[in-house]
Image (cartoon, rainbow, N blue to C red):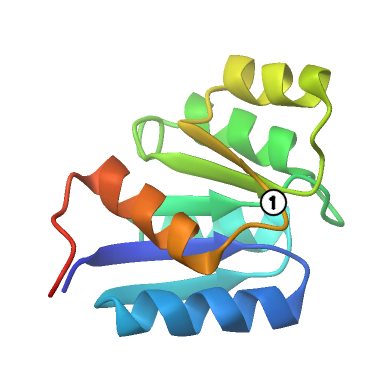
Amino acid sequence: MAGRVLIVDDDPELCATLESAFERAGFSVALALDGRQCLDAVAQDCPDVIVLDIGMPIMDGFQVLHHLRESPASRLVPVVMLTGREEEGTKLEGWMAGTDRYLSKPCEVSTVVSTVRELLREEPSA
């Protein structure tokens, strides 16, 4: 298994697309549709990497990232922010909050998978 990925996004269609791509690439995948579900999932079974949207109900991606970085159990888990918000200030806020990578939507699914592989230092499967 290539690793465990938690996808956090309030768009069920995007979640399904990413889930399928990561499973084809050999990853184990969990899904969360909002920030609270993300934190609950991390508390139950901390993933190897998190793909996190910014604009979500209940708790936005910045709030989630703050909680992740404050917790000893998840502070070192790599986070890829995948969002439609491209403003320079938003990107800067993401970097300052502790994201490891920032990808703007729309984004090729293969780019998301490659970014996660890079973060986990895995070689692509043949």
Q: Amino acid at mark 1?
A: Asp
Judging from the image, what secondary structure is the residue with disc 1 in? loop
The residue that appears at 49% across and 35% down in the rendered structure is 101
Q: Which residue is mark 1?
A: 53
The residue that appears at 80% across and 47% down in the rendered structure is 59
The quarter of the picture where the N terminus appears is bottom left
Left or right, 70 with reference to 38: left
Q: Position of residue 44 (x, y in %)?
A: 42, 63
Q: Position of residue 38 (x, y in %)?
A: 59, 58
Q: Position of residue 36 (x, y in %)?
A: 70, 56
The number of numbered discs placed on residues in the rendered structure image is: 1
Position of residue 8 relative to residue 96, above or below, is: below
- Nearest to the observer: residue 99 or residue 107: 107
The residue that appears at 44% across and 78% down in the rendered structure is 21
Instruction: Tell me where residue 60 sits by quadrant.
Output: top right
Q: Residues within 10 Å of mark 1 (few under 14, many from 20)?
A: many
The quarter of the picture where the C terminus appears is bottom left
Q: Position of residue 34 (x, y in %)?
A: 73, 61
